[in-house]
Image: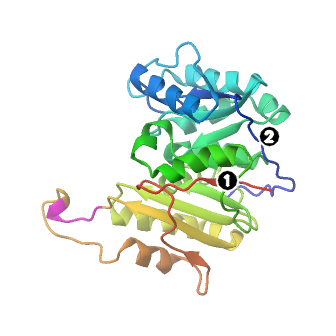
């Protein structure tokens, strides 16, 4: 089962101007004061104004505070019309726990750019299903390890000057997060759109399981094609990866993907987005 409410009107948040405010948020893993300071410096260097809410460095086990706290900081960003973007500090896990707590009314009244990737896929799906575009791009914690050109393109894209414009609407993000949203109203509407997927640190049979689920849910019949980013640090059922015996899956991730899409289906591999040195920013849910 997929979201069967087709989006008829898509819009993008307003472009940023120099000096505009960008809120730092931690919807998943906790963020240290050091990371918050480093991210603030990056935003200032790019010519924008960082906003750090009280309690941004909170911690509840692996999360940046409890669900209500993390959602409240996002909602502060959505309700403050002077804040034009919300940049995630880290991914990890936890964003999907916030979806039912977010202020839809405030967000639709004056949309804010949501910026991030990996676990932030859940927020992208939430936004895109409301008809609002968002920016799949490095989170603050990965910017130092990301190609400098890609980081600069984040600021260019937010300012209304994307270096490249894709032909057609793209939705999606991290495959594991998308898999977790299947059967809910938060799975992105793929109608007449290209589905983008990427992933990290998964066993090959996990990739197969997730692709089977997308196939059985009818996702490939909805989407126009598949855009495949980086699939890095993948593992197999072998001694090399801690198993007691060698029991390899037998297919690489490209073979797995091709094995589950319809014959003749458009699949573009090796796109420079995801958990690698290149993480090209792309607008999801673009008009």
Could you tell me which residue is drawn at 59 percent across and 17 percent down?
53
Residue 69 occupies quadrant: top right
Does residue 110 show up magenta in the picture? Answer: no
Contact, CB < 8 Å: mark 2 with mark 1? no
Foreground: 148 or 262? Answer: 148
The quadrant holding residue 165 is bottom right
Mark 2 burial class by Cα count in 10 Å: few <14, some 14-19, many 20+? some
Q: Which residues are magenta?
A: 235-240
The furthest residue to the bottom: 264
Where residue 43 appears, x then y in whole percent?
Answer: 57, 31
Q: How many labels were placed on the picture?
A: 2
* Residue positioned most to the top: 54
As helix, strand or loop, the secondary structure at mark 2 comes to loop
Do we see residue 70 in this rendering?
yes
Q: Is residue 236 part of the magenta span, yes or no? A: yes
Q: In the picture shown, does residue 235 fall above or below 100?
A: below
Is 55 left, or right, of 245 in this rendering?
Answer: right
Mark pair 2, 1: CA separation: 13 Å
Q: Main secondary structure of the magenta part?
A: loop
Residue 207, how many percent across, how many down? Answer: 42, 64
The residue that mark 2 highlights is 14
Tell me the residue that label 1 is attached to: 283
SS category of the residue bearing label 1:
strand
Seen in the picture, residue 190 relative to 98 is either above or below; the reply is: below
Seen at 50% across and 63% down, the residue is 272
Foreground pick, 248 / 24 = 24
């Amino acid at each position: 089962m997929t979201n069967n409410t087709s989006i008829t009107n898509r819009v993008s948040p307003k472009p940023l101007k120099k000096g505009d405010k960008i809120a730092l948020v931690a919807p998943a893993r906790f963020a240290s004061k050091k990371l918050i300071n480093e991210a603030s410096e990056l935003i200032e260097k790019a010519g924008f104004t960082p906003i750090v809410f009280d309690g941004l460095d909170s911690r509840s086990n692996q999360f940046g505070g409890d669900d209500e706290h993390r959602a409240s900081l996002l909602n502060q960003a959505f309700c403050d019309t002077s804040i034009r973007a919300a940049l995630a500090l880290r991914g990890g896990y936890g964003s999907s726990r916030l979806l039912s707590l977010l202020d839809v009314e405030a967000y639709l009244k004056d949309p804010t750019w949501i910026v991030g990737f990996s676990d932030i896929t859940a927020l992208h799906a939430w936004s895109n299903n409301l008809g609002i575009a968002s920016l799949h791009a490095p989170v603050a914690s990965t910017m130092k390890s990301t190609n400098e050109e890609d980081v600069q393109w984040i600021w260019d894209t937010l300012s209304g000057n994307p270096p490249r414009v894709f032909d057609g609407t793209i939705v999606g993000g991290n495959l594991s997060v998308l898999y977790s949203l299947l059967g809910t109203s938060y799975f992105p509407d793929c109608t007449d759109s290209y589905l983008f997927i990427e992933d990290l640190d998964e066993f090959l049979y996990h990739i197969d399981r997730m692709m089977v689920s997308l196939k059985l849910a009818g996702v490939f019949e909805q989407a126009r094609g598949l855009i495949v980013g980086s699939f890095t640090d993948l593992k197999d059922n072998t001694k090399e990866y801690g198993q007691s015996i060698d029991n390899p899956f037998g297919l690489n991730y490209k073979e797995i993907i091709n094995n589950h899409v319809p014959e003749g289906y458009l699949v573009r591999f090796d796109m420079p987005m995801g958990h690698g040195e290149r993480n090209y920013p792309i607008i999801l849910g673009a008009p």
